[in-house]
Image (tube, helix red, strand yellow):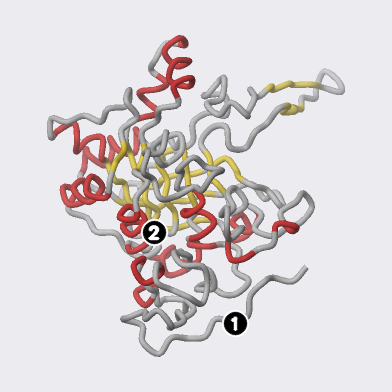
Amino acid sequence: MSRRRGPFAPSTDRTQCSPSAALAPFVRGAADELPSYAQLRRRTDAPAESAWGLFGERDEVGTLNLAGPEQARAAAACVHTGQTLCLDYPLTAFDPPIAPTRGALRHTIFSRHRAHRDDVLDGFYPQAASQLDGLRHRRHQEHGFYNGTPDAEITEGSPALGIQRWAERGIVTRGLVLDVSRFRRESGRPIDHEGGEHLDATALEDALAAQAVRPRPGDALLLHTGWTQWYLGLDPAAQRRVRDNRRFTGVDQDHDVLAWLWDHRFAVIASDTYAFEALPARDDSPFGGTTDHGMMHQQLIAMLGFAVGELWRLGPLARASADDGRWTCLLVAQPLNLPGGVGSPANATAVR
């Protein structure tokens, strides 16, 4: 099945996006020439508020286009001591899984004879613990999957938008630790995890300013809120109450948050929270249509093509960063090479 759109014509003015203007396609190394989020909201050559076509008509990797060889080379300069930190929780850490549609992993070891061992995983949900949401994970209710990929192509056995597209290139770039948890705690306003606090763009920018580091195009945002440490530190009954109440810390459902993320040109946006965004979505959320109850996932994934990470183990990295004042690292992540996969364990490592 062919895709639905014709070519995207280059714009003659890259500083303004008039209602009738088309947006220019991305050229490697020209991240500063990508349109702003405000410009995306006014585009008419593709769905408004989308990045469709900017990385190519048949692009299947989204914002990972921003993390290429130049960013990988530059990220290597962040390695000072060679310290490595695993950014994944164990596959069994969240048992039962927080999402009610996912079951618990069962690990079985078997053998053919006394000198042999092998293992098998039953009930393996790749997104049940530290994870990456692939571009198949959400479609926009009105416009469909990222970059106009037809629904009929999002099936088992079809490679379109599969997680293997990210695995084939790998993820190697500069990680930028944004420790909102530390900033808020030191400001005397600890994050309200019990209430599932919504973090707006001002909260993100204030924490960033306190760290005196600026994002570069192609960075991976590593947003530390302390939520997973808080949740895993609860007793089983309290964890059950959190799951039942469905109140989770995360970023706010707001165009200002989307503008903050897009305009900083992040290739990856990952956090230690359940859904990256707060749940439940705010009552006046402009997103999600009738299917997602105000969630912003349709905008992040289907419209903008972000690589979204959730439930990452960022506590040790945040503490190491605070200890020596270095808030950047070399980030390496290798998703599963599963053709047509929807998501994957993060398989992420920070090197300092």
Quadrant containing the N terminus in the rendered view: bottom right
Q: How far apart are marks 2 and 1 (CA)?
A: 25 Å
Residue 172 sits above or below residue 65 on the image: above
Horizontal side of 72 relative to 346 (left or right) equals left
Q: Where is residue 37 in the image (x, y as percent from the top left)?
A: 36, 66
Give coordinates of residue 22: x percent, y percent.
Answer: 46, 81
For the point 34% across and 74% down, which residue is it? Answer: 32
Q: Where is residue 266 in the image (x, y as percent from the top left)?
A: 39, 59
Residue receiving disc 1: 7
- Which is nearer the eye, 192 or 322? 192
Residue 26 relative to residue 184: left or right: right
The nearer-to-camera label among 2 and 1 is 1
- From the viewer's perspective, is 240 left or right of 259? right
Query: Number of labelled discs?
Result: 2
Task: Kindly give the residue lying farthest to the left in the view shown.
Answer: 187
In the rendered view, tell whether residue 216 sits above or below residue 343: below
From the viewer's side, name the closer residue of 158 and 30: 158
Instruction: Choose between 339 and 45: the one closer to the eye.
Output: 45
> Label 2 is placed on what type of residue?
Phe
Relative vertical location of residue 257 with respect to residue 94 in this rendering, above or below: below
Three-letter code for the amino acid on which mark 1 is drawn = Pro
| Residue sitting at x 40%, y 41% | 277
Is disc 2 surrounded by few (<14), some (14 to 19) or many (20+) residues within 10 Å?
Answer: many
Mark sitting earlier along the chain (2/1): 1
Q: Where is mark 2, residue-wise? A: 266
